[in-house]
Image: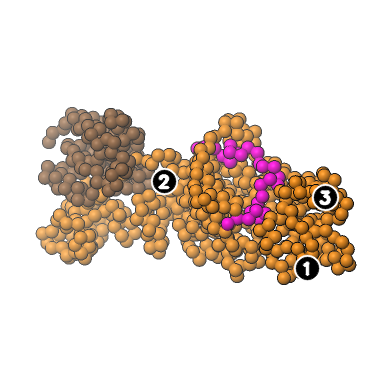
Chain colours: A orange, B brown
Amino acid sequence: MPTIRIPAPLRPYAGNNSTVRVGGTTAGSALEELMRAYPALRQHLYDGDTLRSFVNIFLNEDDIRYLDGPETPVAEQDTLMIIPSVAGGTSPAGQAALGLRAGPGDAELSHEEVRRYSRHLIMPEVGMAGQKKLKASSVLLIGAGGLGSPLAMYLAAAGVGRIGLVDYDVVDASNLQRQVIHGTSDIGRPKLDSARDRILDINPHVRVDTYPVPLTSENALEILLPYDVVIDGTDNFPTRYLTNDACVLLGKPNVYGSIFRFDGQVSVFYAKEGPCYRCLFPEPPPPGLVPSCAEGGVLGILPGTVGALQATEAIKLLLGVGEPLIGRLLLYDALNMEFTEVKLRKNPDCPVCGENPTITKLIDYEAFCGMPAHDRSLYQHGLDTGETVPAISPRALRERIARGEAVQLLDVREPHEWAISNLGHLGATLIPKNRVLERMNELDTAQEIVVYCRTGARSAEVIRLLRQHGFGKLINLEGGINRWAEEVEPDLPVY
Amino acid sequence: MLRLPADLASEIEAHGAASYPYEGCGLLLGVQVDGDNVVRALYPVENRWEVEEEKRERFLITPEAMLQAELAAMRQGLDIVGVFHSHPDHPPVASPRDLAWATWPGYSYLITEVRAGQPGASRSWQLTEDRSGFVEEPVRLVLQEKG
């Protein structure tokens, strides 16, 4: 019968014996005998079925890992020693205890999960305790689009236990260039259905909560409340300010990301520890100044990069490791392939997170930003300033052209959009929106002009602008060239 | 409670200062009396964390060193009752890293702060039974308890 020497702190679990003689002919079977005799030892030596990572078994003076492992034969006179490896260190700089409620004891991992997360479990920064923390934690994604796609997929794969998704849209063909969580066969399906299927295929252990509604001041606090971390993957300013303010009011970290063409931004807004989005941008930009991705375009890969950075920050916050992007704004320029970082300061006069906040509950964010938050919004002010623009439907325009009426067409899109589709065959002229004022002498104030863009928004703005300069006979093409293509000229691509 | 002879406390501080700017580490050898860890001897070991630069904020005691310490303790009729290590330019508080690598409840984790090479406060911690965190334990300096 070999002897096992029990380390001092474990003796209370082994009848206060310093050595125990057990049966068994191999190291593994001898340990099993020990566990049978003293079951309370198991939790300190084993994690599930495997020895804890820091536990080493020595046969006389040799580590059994370098012999035959648990199969190493043991004889009557042999001594097995249970030897821990000991390590530790200081907290990495800036590691703030976020007070997240998840504790390592809150979740257990099945054998299948242990296999699935093994590459995490062998990292000291994650390990069993960290992986359990992830499983016990929850993240809310505002938006299941470009940023939401990589976020949801990576966070699910990493083992975040609960993922909430807010999005009311359906999958459109124009989403697929960047929203990789959705596939071609999903076109027309609600994004949340498609995203949920993909998440559960990646990791069936994830709980997916779906909120197929626009995020509003009425529902935001209720939706955000159960989650540890909120991730802003929105594409508009009203929702971004709403998300920020709700996070400040609820005391939650907000992992922010934004994308435009080749440029991305990432930060972590966490008012308890640093600045919030309003400290950086107290006021939204004037309506119409900053184009959305739908208007300006975005490199399809860009949300992958930015979303992956946001997912990394979220995981760090949940684990409490590393240095979060709190108080720092990371700028990513894909065209020059440059990352730069600017320091952000908390604004003591910030209306929501400052010393004397004036915003203590959620407000009307569409009015604050002067623009609608989503296309189901009833908000009518701001962009069109209440001033309606005469409009014509594509079919009605075709009728007029067919009757031989002289209709001047003005395209206010960018030249690269003209290259995708245009009405040059009907005599259209291209003057990009931001050059209209300097080139308005090319237009005849007396002539009736139908103005169009991609979907009708930019052209309406141009009409309002030109009206102030004496152009009275301007008509907006409803739905832009895309609707024209759908209803009149199916040969033209919709983009 | 950790009962620590005053001369060994000074040795631990000197070891931490000598290891600066890296973390220094070693083992507390002694006996357990009525639930207290009573230190009788020190077994300093080399910080074997593999990346030189990271030794400023990391330490590692290899299983081989632990084995030798255990054997040395046995020869003196003692046991390993705890671990000591220094926190260069950080407070002597058990960190998330210490927790991530923690071994068993029952060991005393004595941490000594070393600021700019000068030893500061030492505090001792024990892992909770459910492994979820460290709780502080009192340290009582005693004259060397013989026998």
User: Regarding mark 3 in the picture, which secondary structure is present there?
Assistant: loop
Residue hosting label 2: A321
Position of A194 with respect to B73 (left or right) is right
Residue hosting label 1: A488
User: Of the residues shown, which amino acid type is indicated by label 2?
Assistant: Val
Residue B70 in view of the camera: no
Residue hosting label 3: A388
Question: Do the dots labelled 2 and 1 sit on one chain?
Answer: yes
Choose between A8 and A169: the one closer to the eye.
A169
Residue A368 x, y percent position in the rendering: 70, 41
| Residue that appears at 31% across and 40% down | B56
Choose between A291 and A165: the one closer to the eye.
A291
| Residue that appears at 41% across and 56% down | A108
Q: Does A278 appear in magenta?
A: yes
Residue A46 x, y percent position in the rendering: 30, 56
Q: Residues within 10 Å of mark 2 (few under 14, many from 20)?
A: many
| Residue that appears at 23% across and 30% down | B141
Real-space Cα separation, disc 3 to disc 1, in angstroms: 25 Å
Q: Are marks 3 and 1 in contact (CB under 8 Å)?
A: no
Query: Where, quadrant-wise, is the C terminus of chain A in this rendering?
Result: bottom right
| Residue that appears at 75% across and 46% down | A438
Q: Are marks 2 and 1 in contact (CB under 8 Å)?
A: no
Q: Does A150 appear in magenta?
A: no
Q: Which residues are magenta?
A: A272-299
Choose between A309 and A408: the one closer to the eye.
A408
Please report, as a chain letter, where disc 3 is located.
A
User: Of the residues shown, which amino acid type is indicated by label 3?
Assistant: Thr
User: Of the residues shown, which amino acid type is indicated by label 1?
Assistant: Val
Displayed quadrant of residue A282: top right
Q: Nearer the viewer, mark 2 or mark 3?
A: 3
